[in-house]
Amino acid sequence: MTDSTIIYTHTDEAPALATYSFLPVIQAYASTAGVTVETRDISLAGRIIAAFPEYLTEDQRIPDALAELGELVNTPGANVIKLPNISASIPQLKAAIAELREQGHALPDYPDDPKTDEQREVRARYDRIKGSAVNPVLRQGNSDRRAPASVKNYAKTHPHRMGAWTPESKTNVAHMTADDFRSTEKSAVIAEAGSLRIELVGDDGSTTVLRESVPVRAGEVVDASVMRVAALREFLTAQVARAKAEGVLFSVHLKATMMKVSDPIIFGHVVRAFFPNTFAKYAETFAAAGLTPNDGLGGIFRGLESLPDGEEIKASFDAELAAGPELAMVDSDRGITNLHVPSDVIVDASMPAMIRTSGHMWGPDGQEHDTLAVIPDSSYAGLYQVVIDDCRANGAFDPSTMGSVPNVGLMAQQAEEYGSHDKTFEIPTTGTVRVLDEAGNAVLEQTVGAGDIFRMCQTKDAAIKDWVKLAVTRARATGDPAVFWLDRDRAHDASLIAKVERYLPEHDTEGLQIEIKSPVEATAFSLERIRRGENAISVTGNVLRDYLTDLFPILELGTSAKMLSVVPLINGGGLFETGAGGSAPKHVQQLVKENYLRWDSLGEFLALAVSFEQFAQTTGNARAQVLADTLDRATETFLNEDKSPTRRVGGIDNRGSHFYLALYWAQELAKQADDADLAKAFVPLAETLTSQEQKIVEELLAVQGSPADIGGYYNPDPAKAAAVMRPSPTLNQALATLAV
Ligand SMILES: NC(=O)C1=CN([C@@H]2O[C@H](COP(=O)(O)OP(=O)(O)OC[C@H]3O[C@@H](n4cnc5c(N)ncnc54)[C@H](OP(=O)(O)O)[C@@H]3O)[C@@H](O)[C@H]2O)C=CC1
Ligand SMILES: O=C(O)CCC(=O)C(=O)O
Ligand SMILES: [Mg+2]
């Protein structure tokens, strides 16, 4: 890899499939400017393979690309295009391992209950792969996510469908009000660099070291909080009863993928709360069979099939399911409930999807219903209630008139909750967790009970400083008000507010509207503005960054896939994420079933243009700038001509959208006057693509409608996937002839 390289990540599911079609276009066009675009495999399957070289044959081994990119993003020359990847829950991780084994990779099983040293080592390696293991490594900068003007204008002239809201809607959010992470939080600012130790002092006099050493830097904010399990259980039981009494669906919204330690445990408590008698009666059977509610009902039901009293236990589940409130469904046709798989319902995408659909989720009858959305921790849940109340009072949002809420997110250096996994513990015994400095002074302390979830978070001073600067930069660039979503009554936020108030005066804020409001107030402020067609920049911490960059895009644009998502890296260089959405498993299912991929690559187009622009600036390669400018114009034409994938067989899909982007881009390159040689090189391609449009589209449409074989879900066969994703010989041939 040299300074003249752009890295395009190879990830999973729909984005990976899209890459088979789009990357050849990118590589062909980039080569005309002497820009090399290389891939690095950070897919779930790739990361598993890279972690177990000694189990594999020489030709099966692959290097650890994530480690390599983790170093690259700390260098000023970094230019990485990052597509969404799977943040694997345990069921997903196990499925990927099974598929790889079937393909001939002699990988070890995931040890549920490791007993030997070897099993513990295997488990540790798998645990490093699970959950959100990629983004925190690559995101060495804060985040700037927004809808470019062309995308926003497109949404206004082509508004997506929004489900109507009525004042009678019974949809609500339920959250705890005490004894949760928010209510128990304590915060401190570290004076001097050093290291902290986390230990549990049991009421029985024992001391257990939970983490020997947590390195800290001067000025960083550290927090400790606890989710008290007794209060959580009481809360959950009450919500099951409330949903039943109100006649609404019961659903739970967590982030079991990203919050890979805390949220599966909380998810497990929800499953227990829904089936209290079954878990009380068969606790020992489940434990002996290694079945845990943390992995969801799906895994338990599969496990029951091989147990002698499996049928009896299943009947007990069925009885409690029938007696409780109706459960929100992930797939009512196949009987998959909200409690089947912890990663099926992910709060950032699931809450906006509900709000966009009249406040409804799907019930067991396959129909839409009002819902009680349970989000146990109160740190951020309140914002959704404000949106729901607003929709109840004022009706659904109107994408053709509404303003925009872009986001400046504090994300660098594993900020806040999203970097807390190695400091999160399910507490074994009652006592006190103490966070001690090197001199043995307690920096933070929390009393805990058995089963409570203790969590410590870190936020680096340099990251906060950079975030404040980015907020001012965006406010200045747009003239829109910037609101820091921080709550003076929350311990961590109070520490942050002190820093924001210190760092803001270091910038020229003359004439800018910069405010600090609690999440609930900030939501109300932003909603009022966007209903008037005005914008409000949200300046938030890491979790709200995640939530808001799905919420507002999904309301404004129909999907977060259309967002520009830039991460200016703290050490220079750029990470360009594609959209804000994920890897959408149902898109792959549709491709396999009927050879139709409705993945929208607009996020990739937007990321590529800013990547070329950054490349031009850091290397002085003027042609890269021409590629960036022409791609921007091509993307605008692409939007105006409405060439995004449709949703159904018969329309152009992801592959067709790539063809049109290639066509408009070639046309722009052929007619630009900044670089005559480059224009000359693109004239023949532009002519071919223009004259062959109908033939190419026919070739692309002809394959639709019957099943497609890509040779694997987590680890598709590259040759098969490429064949499926590049079905137009005319287009492939045209691209192959491009040369400067
Ligand atoms: N940056 C990253 O790496 C991220 C990774 N993920 C991972 O993705 C997986 C699925 O997560 P989930 O929360 O379900 O969220 P997704 O964003 O994958 O899916 C939610 C919905 O968003 C829409 N959508 C998202 N992207 C596109 C696109 N490019 N084109 C068309 N529609 C799109 C679809 O909705 P509709 O059908 O209504 O149009 C989709 O069903 C998980 O493994 C998760 O961990 C999730 C978020 C970010
Ligand atoms: O890393 C992940 O698991 C998801 C990231 C995500 O949802 C986001 O950044 O918007
Ligand atoms: Mg997200």
Image (tube, rainbow, N blue to C red):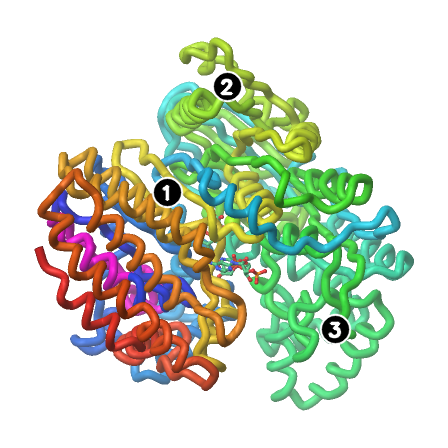
Examine the rendering and report whether any part of residue 330 can be seen: yes
Residues drawn in magenta: 23-52
Which residue is denoted by mark 3 in the rendering?
Answer: 366
Q: Which residue is drawn at 27% across and 41% down?
A: 629
User: Residue 139 — which label?
Assistant: 1
> To which quarter of the image does residue 599 belong?
bottom left
Q: Are marks 2 and 1 in contact (CB under 8 Å)?
A: no
Quadrant where the image shows the C terminus: bottom left
* Residue closest to the eye, 152 or 572: 152
- As drawn, is 447 to the left or to the right of 498? right
Q: Does the residue labelled 2 lie within 8 Å of ligand 2?
A: no
Instruction: Return the disc, 2 or 1, that comes first in the chain's sequence.
Output: 1
Q: For label 2, count other residues whose C-alpha is less than 10 Å away and answer few (under 14), some (14-19) or many (20+).
A: some
Q: Based on the picture, tell me whether residue 29 belongs to the magenta stretch.
A: yes
Q: Any magenta on residue 456?
A: no
- Give, as a three-letter code, the residue at label 2: Val
Give the x, y percent position of residue 667. Answer: 26, 53
In front here: 145 or 695?
695
Q: Distance between the residues labelled 2 and 1?
A: 21 Å
At which x and y percent is residue 81?
A: 31, 50
Is the C-beta of the residue carrying label 3 under 8 Å from the nearest atom of ligand 1? no
| Furthest residue in direction front, as rendered | 691
Q: In this view, does 283 lie above or below 448?
A: below
